[in-house]
Structure formats: structure tokens, C-alpha cells
Image: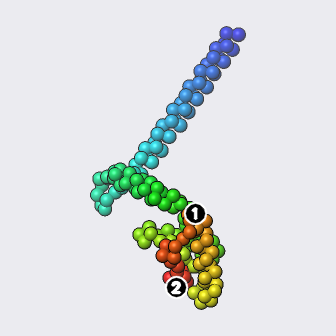
């Protein structure tokens, strides 16, 4: 009787071990399938063609180098845009200027406009840690877009 009980427990333990190994293999297989799908997302289809091409790695590396170059030249770049209730400040790299988008109505008085632009300029200077020359920014009213 004791031998049958021991045999039963040994078989039960073996079945549990096989069950957990199988579960582990299923999870690992699903994870590898998911990774494979992630890798496939790098592929893009062109038109009606059934062939796929890998996105050009050179383009991705060029993008990384460009990002590093921008951050090297403008260490404050990642701090933008600055968004406040009255304005949004963005860096326009093509013009090498800051653009201040005023959220206040264009019909606001000159004093209010100058006050908001002044606040925006001070927030830019706080981020870039230097005085901002007048030719390094421009503003526009968002309600005129």
C-alpha cells in the first residue's frame, strides 16, 4: 500500500514538472512570436507589391546622428516646446529662431501682447541660460492661422 502511495506521489510530481516545462515552453514560444512580429513591423509594403523591404538602417542612423548633432549644438533643444496658458514657444530649426505662438486674441491691446511676449522671452532665456537677441525670435497669433 505504501509503495502505491509513493508511486502515486512520484507520478504526480513528474506530471507537475512536465506541465510546468510545457507551460514555460509555450510562454517562450509566444514571446519569440511577439518579438518576430515586432521585427516584422520594421518591414514596409510598397504599393501593391507583395515583396517587403527593410526600412533603411542608414536613414535611422542618420536620424540619430542628426538628433545628436542638434542636441550638441543646442543643448536646451529637448526642453522645447514650452507651453503656457498664454503662449507656446517652439524652436524652428530652419530659421534658427524661436517662434512664440500667442494664444491671446489678436485684438488684444499692444500692452497685453508685449507683456505676453516678454513672459515668453523670459521663459526662453531661463531655459537657454543666456540673453535672447531680438532677431532670435518672432511671434504670431494663433487665432490668425
Please tell me whether mark 2 sits on a helix, a strand or a loop.
helix
> How many dots with numbers?
2
Please tell me whether mark 1 sits on a helix, a strand or a loop.
loop
Whether residue 131 appears in this view of the structure is yes
Residue 5 falls left or right of residue 135: right
Give the labeled residue for mark 1: 129
Q: Residues within 10 Å of mark 2 (few under 14, many from 20)?
A: few
Q: Position of residue 2 (x, y in %)?
A: 71, 10
Residue 36 versus residue 15 in the image, above or below: below
Q: Closer to the camera, 61 or 26?
A: 61
Residue 56 versus residue 14 in the image, above or below: below
Q: Closer to the camera, 81 or 40?
A: 81
Q: What residue do we see at 67% from left, 13% from top?
A: 6
Calculate the distance from the C-alpha at mark 1 to the C-alpha at mark 2: 31 Å
Q: Position of residue 42 (x, y in %)?
A: 39, 51
Residue 29 is labelled as none
- Quarter occupied by residue 83: bottom right
Amino acid at each position: 500500500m505504501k509503495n502505491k502511495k509513493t508511486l502515486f506521489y512520484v507520478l504526480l510530481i513528474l506530471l507537475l514538472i512536465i506541465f510546468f516545462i510545457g507551460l514555460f515552453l509555450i510562454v517562450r514560444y509566444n514571446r519569440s512570436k511577439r518579438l518576430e512580429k515586432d521585427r516584422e513591423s520594421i518591414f514596409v509594403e510598397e504599393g501593391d507589391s507583395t515583396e517587403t523591404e527593410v526600412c533603411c538602417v542608414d536613414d535611422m542612423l542618420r536620424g540619430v546622428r542628426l538628433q545628436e548633432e542638434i542636441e550638441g549644438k543646442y543643448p536646451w533643444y529637448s526642453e522645447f516646446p514650452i507651453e503656457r496658458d498664454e503662449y507656446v514657444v517652439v524652436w524652428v530649426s530652419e530659421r534658427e529662431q524661436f517662434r512664440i505662438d500667442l494664444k491671446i486674441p489678436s485684438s488684444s491691446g499692444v500692452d497685453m501682447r508685449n507683456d505676453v511676449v516678454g513672459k515668453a522671452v523670459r521663459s526662453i532665456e531661463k531655459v537657454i541660460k543666456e540673453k535672447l537677441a531680438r532677431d532670435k525670435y518672432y511671434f504670431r497669433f494663433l487665432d490668425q492661422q
